[in-house]
Image (cartoon, rainbow, N blue to C red):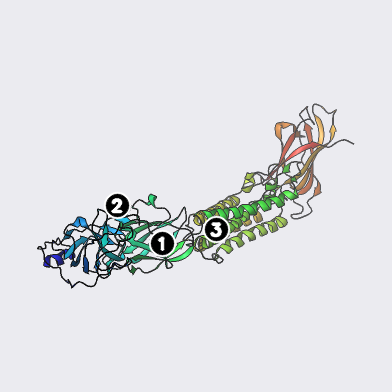
Amino acid sequence: MASLRAFAAGEPPGVPAGAPPPGSAAPRPATAAPGLPPAPAGDQAAVPGLGASSPKPARAIVANVEPAEVVRGAGVIVSGSGFPPSPDQIEIRLDDHRIVPREVDPNGTWLTFVVPAKRTERDRGGSGRDRREAKQGLLRLGIHRLSVLVKSGGPASWVPARGRAHQLRLVPDTEGPPELSATYPAVTYPESRYQLSVMGSGFSREPSDNIPVVDGRELAVCEHLDCSSCTGEVCVKVVSSRQLEISGMPKDGLSGPRDLRIRVGDDVSNPIRVTFSGVAQNVPLWAAALFVLVCVVLIAMAVAAAGKVTLPSGDTLGSWGTLFLDKETQSYSVGKLQLYLWWFAAIFGYVYLTAARSLVQGNLDLAPIPDRLPGIVMISSATSVLAIGITNVRGPKGAGDIKPSLSDFITVGGLVAAERVQFLVWTLVGVTSFLLLVVLRDPAEIQDLPQIPEGFLYLMGISSFGYLGGKLVRGAGPVIDLADVIDVDEKAQPFRLAELHIRGRNLSRDASVRFHGGFARLVTGTRPEVIEKEDRPPEGEYARILSLKIEITNASWPAGSYELTLSNPDGQEAVSRVVARPTA
């Protein structure tokens, strides 16, 4: 008796022949196992799926099963009477799992078996004559119906033992109920199906015992150890007693923030919040980029509808160039550039944040705007407006080359301006840093746009002040609308003499003129004469039309293309083509 108790506790039995098991009781009236038809007295009816009926069934009776709760690998004692002496003549079933007894009492009063810790044969419900009609399956945690079948008659004739119905509860071999502490990531993306790692304690060593429960919905767990063999079911891997890896969770019905629990047997863990993203990780990035692209396309369509811009030189400027063009000087404006950059950076960041919070995190609300981002945009807008005002008061910068170029962003009339360089550099640093901080943040975790430091806000203000201060202090630069040659004296020797008129704004009487390629030169001893003075500030200092006496040294004139550069005393320049005015 002591040895049977030891076996039930997991120790090997050493039972004397004929020793009755503990808890044995007098036989009760014969009853069929649960779910099976009742057996008539004297003859046992055939069990569906177990073989043909036997005219002389064995009169085995199950009286008691102990213990009632076991873990996998533990021993169980079944006591009763009439058990065949050979284990080959007895089959134990826990639901549809087949188990062969470990030992049977020669007197037929008890038998023992071990609850399988690995996968066992499971009856498919086919004919009992073909024992190959079985598949491998793991005995799940929970309550199982226990049946004892004995062989009677033919080789495939199995009938259930009599007695009341018995149940066996399979419990986990954990130290306590499962508890969850964290998940990684906090937001999981549906690349194909959801997957995540769960940290905590109280997990079963058998993967399929750990059942994920999402908002009360239990997910079917695959019994295969190889996740590639799981189709339509969740795969659970036990990394350690404190970590699980769950993959293959279905996308249907799991989008948004959910409560995740793990059930092990009858014990259910505490909930932990997990967000199941409805879209892939890069969707917010593409959404923001697409929105900005649509804005750019709409702007481009509006600009294209206005047509190309014809410059005073006769050249045309494409639609995109007109967005940055300063019409006063026919050059690119760095003030407009920084305004566009900050506006599009702010729009991109806000759309990215909103898409991440709504599509990934499931928060269907407008995203908050960082406190200092409006300040940056305000500084950019104010700088552009003030720059226009200063130009109207002080006059435009020097035009530089004939056609606008990228150098216009850092030059004034062909001269590199330090205040423009620092203004452009700090704009690029700020915009690039802001965008990088936005796109490098996981859309699952981003809650607001990067906070712009107060010191950087001051720095942008100082940079803008320096840019505007430079425009205010520096004098106006030359802008040439037309340079034409009139009154050519073809008889003059050794070179033809002519009069050159330069029309524009902010033309200094003390300006120097350089003829490209040396096609002409100023007549020795002459200087530019003012024909028409500038009619807006700073009046008196500049002219609108200058007249120069020149010698045409190029015999090919007027055939070909000719250019000149006019430089004011402060070094600001303007380049223009030189044309011949038709004679009357």
Identify residue type, mark 2.
Arg
The residue carrying mark 3 is: 352
> Disc 1 or 2, which lies upstream in sequence?
2
Give the label, 3 or 1, closer to the camera.
1
Give the label, 3 or 2, closer to the camera.
2
How far apart marks 3 and 2 lie (CA) works out to 61 Å
The residue carrying mark 1 is: 219
Is residue 133 among the parts visible in the rendering? yes
Residue 133: image location, x then y, percent: 33, 52
Q: Residue at x 61, y 62 (%)?
A: 378
Residue 131's mark? 2
Identify residue type, mark 1.
Leu
164 vs 323, left or right, is: left
Front residue (pair 559, 100): 100
Is residue 9 among the parts visible in the rendering? no
Residue 184 drawn above or below residue 532: below
Classify residue 99 by image quadrant.
bottom left
Front residue (pair 54, 495): 54
Whether the residues at callouts 3 and 1 have beta carbons within 8 Å, the answer is no
> Disc 3 or 2, which lies upstream in sequence?
2
For label 1, the crowd category at 10 Å Cα-Cα, with few meaning under 14, some 14 to 19 and many 20 or more, is some
Q: Helix, strand, or loop for circle 3?
A: helix
Identify residue type, mark 3.
Tyr
Residue 317: image location, x then y, percent: 71, 44
> Disc 3 or 1, which lies upstream in sequence?
1
